[in-house]
Amino acid sequence: MINVSGRYQIINRLMKRLFLIISLSTIYIPVFSQFLLSGEFRPRTEFRDGYKTLLSKDQNPALVTSQRTRLNMNYNDKRVSTRFSVQDVRTWGESALKTDASSMNIFEAWAELMITDEISVKLGRQELSFDQNRLMGASNWNDVGASHDLLLLKFHKNFDMQAGLAYNNDKSKVSESNYSVSNYKSLGFLRAEKNIGKYINVSVIGIADGYEKEADYKTIFQRYTYGCNLQLKNDSLRSRVYASSYFQSGKNPDGIPINAYFMSVNYDYAFTKSLNGIIAAEYFSGDDAFSTDSRYNSFNNLYGNGHGTYGYMDYFLQIDKDTRNGGLLNLYARGTFKFSRKVSGELSYHYLSLTNNIIDSLSVPGNNIKAHRYLGSEVDLNMKFKAADNVELSAGYSVMLATPTMEILKGGDHTRYQNWAWVMLTFKPEFLNTGKNQITK
């Protein structure tokens, strides 16, 4: 038997050896490689009195605190890059004291190998973020985030190109069977981007995602989304124009033929070094509830970010479902101002409307009459204070001025004052970074 003192000595020796190994690794690591061990601590408290949906007069607002904690490990050298990120996501109080309830998961785990100076292959669980996050985004506001299990081929020379491929299963198996996860079965995409002269950037993208027919693994409905993005930027004129156009065809996850489209344009102008303004228009096609067209005309924004783009209150994250296939017109104006090196603010206004007809189920129940298309307006105010390079405190307040048509979509009571307030702390410490003070052998 080992007494308490003996156990303490053993633990002490092990800790000393571990510290010695870490110290030596930072001293003798080759100069061309780098290891970074970092973290993220992000608690957020929200007062929800109309967030995501309209509340009725007899409902009480919710006060919720959520927390995301991440540990990230990155390694880079001339030919290989890897990243491993594990996270814990929880709502304060969701688990009783002394309850052994795990919420840990792997957010990213990938390796990228440089085949040549121009070509690399990256495989594993990874974020995807392209073209203002319209179709592919990391969903950073969401505590869990969004990452994909896939193989990514990258090419960079006279232009940039990325090609991704994924094929999913719900478990390890020896023969195909029904895929029970609410996710795509297959995903493939090709994206190319090129600068044309000093002021023009063009990108094109094509995405094919497949969903299994319910209880029939042999049938996969393929949806095709393709389009282009154009950016015109001139720093001397202090302005930028960004325009996108996408189309969808194939079949939706329910097997209905698709004929849908999306268009957007925004104009960004820097009034001064501290004041910047944006005006934008975004149009999602929709289905006419009074039409006999059997095709699915409502554009789905796939795996893109909705938060902030279509309003911070997150009424419209998956556009087709959140509008009951009525489509969405989002006209918005946004101003950002830097009060100082550490403090900045943002004010946004969104005009929200359907682009097609849905049935008014509230005014005259039982009668099929058209609902007014105007959904309401959203006003968002956000502030950020950067206390240090790795510490940021942010807060926001939003109001939804809803119409009866929004009540048709979301329920609740549109006459109630719907608002939302939040405050969030983001701390990203670096525990170890061999790239800062490397010493060669």
Image (cartoon, helix red, strand yellow):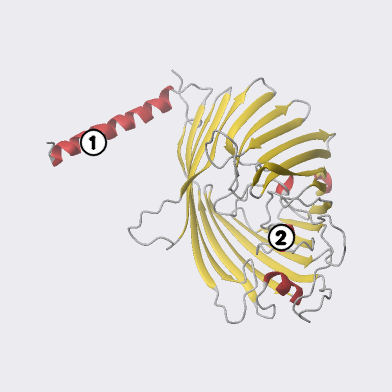
The x, y position of residue 412, in whole percent, is: 65, 76
SS class of the residue under badge 2? helix
- Mark 2 vs mark 1: give the one in front: 2
Q: Is residue 399 above or below residue 21?
A: below
Which image quadrant for residue 185?
top right
As shown in the figure, which amino acid type bears the numbered disc 2? Lys
- Foreground residue, 134 or 434? 134
Mark 1 Cα-neighbour bin, 10 Å: few <14, some 14–19, many ≥20: few
Furthest residue in direction top, as rendered: 441
The x, y position of residue 78, in whole percent, is: 58, 22
Disc 2 vs disc 1: Cβ atoms closer than 8 Å?
Answer: no
The residue tagged 1 is 12
Camera sees residue 149: yes
* N-terminal-most mark, 2 or 1: 1
SS class of the residue under badge 1? helix
- Could you tell me how many numbered marks the image carries? 2
Q: Which mark is residue 321?
A: 2
Left or right? Give the position of 111 relative to 398: left
The x, y position of residue 372, in whole percent, is: 82, 73
Distance between mark 2 and mark 1 Cα atoms: 58 Å
